Amino acid sequence: MYCDRCGEPAAEGDHAACRAAREMEPPRYCAHCRRRMVVQVTPLGWTARCVAHGELQPQSGSA
């Protein structure tokens, strides 16, 4: 698995800054395959799409 903000392996390094940033912004990388996602931000939220894994949307309670 990969960090959905920086794209680096989630098990390596400290991702505290990534987790903090993700409270305010959408993911940028697919957590499954590390591909850069197509992200659209609107006044009502965001969507992110990986070419291999499809579309992600914010979960309830998330940004």
Image: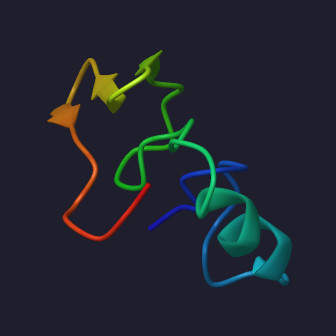
Which residue is located at x 39 percent, y 44 percent? 33
- Going by the image, does 13 lie left or right of 7? right
Q: Tell me the quarter of the image containing the N terminus.
A: bottom left
Camera-side residue of 25 and 4: 25
Q: Is residue 53 visible in this depiction of the protein?
A: no
* Residue 48 visible (yes or no): yes
Q: Which residue lies at the image location 44% right of the left edge and 54% below the top edge?
A: 63
Where is residue 53? Give x, y as percent: 18, 35
Q: Splitting the image into 4 quarters, where does residue 19 fall?
A: bottom right
Q: In the visual, does 56 lie left or right of 43?
A: left
Q: How is the image coloured?
A: rainbow
Q: x, y percentage for residue 31? A: 42, 55
Q: Residue at x 22, y 42 (%)?
A: 57
Residue 42, how many percent across, how many down?
41, 17
Which residue appears at 53% of the width and 39% of the height?
A: 29
Q: Which one is nearer the viewer's eye here, 35 or 17? A: 17
Using the image as rendered, state which of residue 24 and residue 9 is in the foreground: 24
